[in-house]
Amino acid sequence: MKQNNDSPKSKFVCLLLCVFLGWLGAHRFYTGKFGTAILMIFVTAGFSYLSVFGIPIWPFIDLVFILDGSFRDKDGRPVTRWATQFFPRGHR
């Protein structure tokens, strides 16, 4: 039996958080990456002049990774599901 190694986190939620609150690292908090989320707040606030068309570089790179399916959660599992699985298979 093949095990699904994808993250249970939603790619759609992660994408929305990155687009609207990316400079605060909200998408990283959502996926459990608390350390880099806090670092992201300080970096994007402290180096706000490092932007492309007004978009901070780090959240923009994360946005590309999320869309590509390369963004991973704290356990290293790719965030690829567009919807969150609320109930595990076989649960009734």
Image (spheres, rainbow, N blue to C red):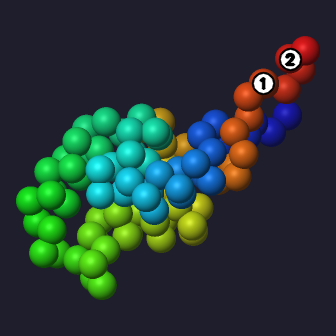
Image coordinates of residue 9 in percent, x first then y, are 60, 40
Relative side of 87 to 52, left or right: right
Q: Residue at x 43, y 48 (%)?
A: 27
Image coordinates of residue 11 in percent, x first then y, are 61, 52
Q: Which quadrant holds the N terminus?
A: top right
Relative side of 70 to 55, left or right: right
Q: Which quadrant holds the C terminus?
A: top right
- In the rendered structure, find residue 59 and report the number of the disc placed on it: none
Q: Front-most of 84 and 74? A: 84
Counting other residues with Cα less than 10 Å from the Cα at mark 2, is it few (<14), some (14-19), or many (20 or more)? few
The reply to whether callout 1 and callout 2 are in contact (CB within 8 Å) is yes
Mark 1 lies on a secondary structure that is loop
Image coordinates of residue 46 in percent, x first then y, are 9, 59
The extreme bottom residue here reads 53
Q: At label 2, which amino acid type do we have?
A: His
Q: Mark 1 points at which residue?
A: 87
* Mark 1 vs mark 2, CA separation in Å: 6 Å
Counting other residues with Cα less than 10 Å from the Cα at mark 1, is it few (<14), some (14-19), or many (20 or more)? few
Q: Residue at x 78, y 24 (%)?
A: 87
Image coordinates of residue 23 in percent, x first then y, are 30, 57
- Indicate whether 49 appears above or below 82: below
The extreme left residue here reads 46
Query: Do we see residue 87 in this rendering?
Result: yes
Q: Report the number of numbered marks.
A: 2
Relative side of 40 to 73, left or right: left
Q: At label 1, which amino acid type do we have?
A: Phe
Relative side of 54 to 80, left or right: left
Q: Mark 2 points at which residue?
A: 91
- Indicate whether 41 appears above or below 35: below
Q: Residue at x 45, y 62 (%)?
A: 19
Query: Do we see residue 78 in this rendering?
Result: no
Location of residue 52 by image quarter: bottom left
